[in-house]
Image (cartoon, rainbow, N blue to C red):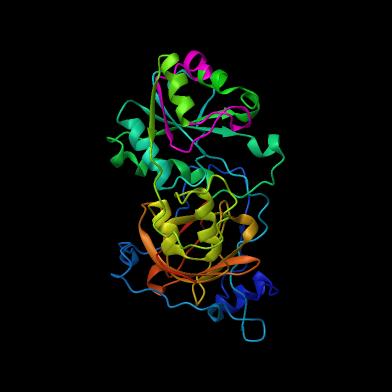
């Protein structure tokens, strides 16, 4: 655990006497579409190819940060985060004419996993692909709020990465306020898609249910779409190859062995990043919201941030060696990560840090987790 009790100013005097203050504080109200400008902090020659074996990596353990009885000083900590809220490019809102004539994929797109990607692929084969999801469900249904799997500011990057699968077209998110459709019958919901929104067709998984109290299934969706003159494309679920994975609730009626956001959450909770990558079809990217004025390169090239500054779901507490900091050019710089009960700690290779950081303005720090297991 980091020796967080040390004052930052004391630590800076030990690391670099010529630095008198450290303006690292986490805040809000920043443009979430901008990635932290790390290109000037991280040397290009340290960029990794991402294949897991071509560059040297830190062999990291929790002890690299030191415990209070062993540490000679604190590590720069990104602190005082005010909120987990972030600004990002907003999805298309209800009532927008942009969705008219499009093909809408139906589902809960929390994780943007390979099953969701398959829905987008099928939609793109018929027309302009949209992802339709509901907002405000937790508030309406009284659910406990949950930190998202994909940071809001990172969703557009993920969707853009799907373009190569979707005929070089980037799927567009389309959101409907759940409160406006909560009590709609299956017939009324399909009518809304057809008459109000001008949707030309829908794509859904074979287990999809819709309408008030989930009264409608995929077969009824097909029938209702035909009656409204819309196309309906029902696809088979993408099955999870790891059927022996534990923690899955067998009483969940929606759990039939398919790839799901629930499985992604359980895999993250287990710290099995190889499994997480399989489910997502990409590395899990953690986004930390930061704001700073001065950054100091200390001997161990470490920094930390409290968990309150994480904009999406982190894996299980533990040590992760196969990780990367992503700079503004999407170059990957090897690093090691330790997650404890209160904070996330990052240690960079010496080759990945400039001798003098100078004055910087951190905004969003992106960390990718490679194929590793706690």
Q: Is residue 77 left or right of residue 121?
A: right
Q: Position of residue 293 (x, y in %)?
A: 57, 57
Relative placement, left or right, of 9 versus 157 is right
- Give the magenta range: 191-217
Can residue 198 be seen? yes
The answer to which quarter of the image holds residue 11 is: bottom right
Q: Within the magenta stretch, is there residue 349?
A: no
**Residue at horizontal 52 percent and vertical 16 percent from the top:** 191
Judging depth in this view, the residue of 163 and 65 nearest the camera is: 163
Residue 325's x, y, as percent? 43, 61
Which quadrant: the N terminus?
bottom right
Q: Is residue 210 magenta?
A: yes
- In the rendering, at what x and y percent does residue 222 appear? 43, 24
Name the side, left or right, on which 180 lies relative to 93.
Answer: right
Picture layout, residue 85 above or below residue 301: above
Q: Nearer the viewer, residue 301 or 188?
A: 188
Q: Residue at 56% across / 45% down in the picture?
A: 253
Identify which residue, 354 or 344, lies in the foreground.
Answer: 344
323 in relation to 197, above or below: below
Q: Residue at x 50, y 40 (%)?
A: 109
Residue positioned 46% across, 67% down in the render: 356
Of 309 and 102, which appears nearest the observer? Answer: 102
Residue 62 vertical position relative to residue 213 in the rendered view, above or below: below
Number of numbered markers:
0
Quadrant position of residue 55:
bottom left
Q: Position of residue 359 (x, y in %)?
A: 52, 58
């Amino acid at each position: 655990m980091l020796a967080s009790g040390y004052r930052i100013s004391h630590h800076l005097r030990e690391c670099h006497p010529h630095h008198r203050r450290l303006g690292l504080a986490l805040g809000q109200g920043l443009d979430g579409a901008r990635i932290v400008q790390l290109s000037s902090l991280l040397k290009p020659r340290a960029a990794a190819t991402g294949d897991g074996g071509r560059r040297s990596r830190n062999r990291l353990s929790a002890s690299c940060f030191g415990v209070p009885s062993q540490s000679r000083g604190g590590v720069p900590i990104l602190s005082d985060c005010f909120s987990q809220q972030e600004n990002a490019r907003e999805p298309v809102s209800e009532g927008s004419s942009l969705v008219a004539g499009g093909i809408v994929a139906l589902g809960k797109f929390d994780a943007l996993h390979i099953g969701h990607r398959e829905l987008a692929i099928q939609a793109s084969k018929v027309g302009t692909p949209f992802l339709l999801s509901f907002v405000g469900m937790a508030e309406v249904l009284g659910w406990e709020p949950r930190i998202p799997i994909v940071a809001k500011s990172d969703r557009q990057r993920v969707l853009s990465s799907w373009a190569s699968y979707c005929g070089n077209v980037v799927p567009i998110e389309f959101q409907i306020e759940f409160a406006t459709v909560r009590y709609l019958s299956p017939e009324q919901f399909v009518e809304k898609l057809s008459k109000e929104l001008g949707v030309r067709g829908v794509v859904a998984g074979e287990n999809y249910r819709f309408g008030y109290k989930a009264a409608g299934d995929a077969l009824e969706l097909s029938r209702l779409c035909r009656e409204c003159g819309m196309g309906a494309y029902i696809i088979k679920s993408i099955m999870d190859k790891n059927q022996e994975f534990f923690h899955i609730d067998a009483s969940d009626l929606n759990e039939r062995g398919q790839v799901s956001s629930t499985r992604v959450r359980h895999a993250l909770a287990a710290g099995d990043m190889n499994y997480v990558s399989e489910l997502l079809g990409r590395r899990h990217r953690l986004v930390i919201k930061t704001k700073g004025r001065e950054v100091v390169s200390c001997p161990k090239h470490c920094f930390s941030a409290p968990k309150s500054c994480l904009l999406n779901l982190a894996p299980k507490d533990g040590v992760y060696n196969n990780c990367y900091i992503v700079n503004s050019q999407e170059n990957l710089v090897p690093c090691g990560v330790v997650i404890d009960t209160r904070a996330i700690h990052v240690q960079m290779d010496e080759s990945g840090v400039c001798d003098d950081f100078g004055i910087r303005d951190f905004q969003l720090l992106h960390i990718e987790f490679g194929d590793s297991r706690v």
